[in-house]
Image (tube, rainbow, N blue to C red):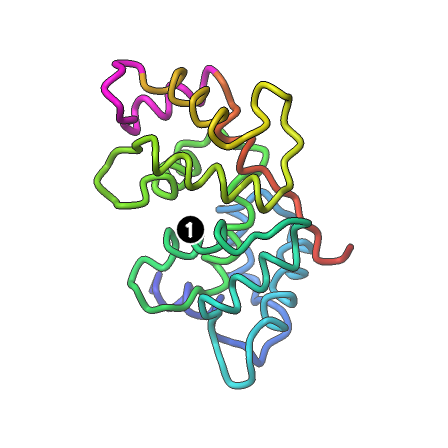
Amino acid sequence: MEATRSEQMGSKSSKRSLNPESLQQLRNEVNLSPEEIQAWYKEYLTSLRGGQQELTRDEFKKVYNSLFIGDASKFAEHVFRTFDKDGSGTVNFKEFLIGLCVSGSDTNNEVKLKWAFNMYDINGDGFINKSEMKEIVEAIYKMTNAMAPKELDTPEKMTEKLFEEFDLNKDGHITFEEFKEGASKDPVIINLLECDPDPDS
């Protein structure tokens, strides 16, 4: 049943609005109003090519690039990788929406922290190393044209700061527990993921 409802959210491209059951399920996962979710659903549908039911990697990147002032292509690649669990090469609406809303008001929610950790853990080995973190931070800086304080105005400086704070045992790797503890003390890692794009603006 669960898979069927999920498919309904991303595959009924002929419908212009979500049914109440799908809408409620999404509201349980993201911090958006029904009106905002419906607006994003319409945005999602307009991004699909004729006859397609889910977003391809290239279309997904185009959507992100339309939402941010910088180049969001690399960040979108990592978001896509994180949510394309079955390796199908496409992202349904539920995956799309959660990716956009990962930094909602409940950013300390463990589910969202786990999502962020998995995105930083590029090779999927259960740890974040410095090169992985630098790659994600660079993607975020490109996407947002980040105007960080001078002491953190490059991805390299930000990466060093994050590792200094998060790598508690100084072994060169960040575990999820270290990531979670670091985020509770300093929300900078989550703030890096913040975005509030508005499809109606």
Q: Residue at x 65, y 54 (%)?
A: 67
Q: Is residue 88 above or below residue 124?
A: below
Query: Nearest the camera: 87 or 33?
Result: 87
Q: Residue at x 47, y 72 (%)?
A: 54
Magenta stretch holds residue 176: yes
Q: Residue at x 56, y 52 (%)?
A: 72
Left or right of residue 73, residue 41 in this image: right
Q: Which image quadrant for residue 194?
A: top right
Q: Is residue 4 above or below residue 117?
A: below
Pointer 1: what residue?
78
Q: What element does badge 1 sit on?
A: helix
Magenta stretch holds residue 80: no
Q: Position of residue 66 (x, y in %)?
A: 65, 59
Q: Position of residue 88 (x, y in %)?
A: 33, 69
The region drawn magenta spans 168-185
Image quarter of the C terminus: bottom right
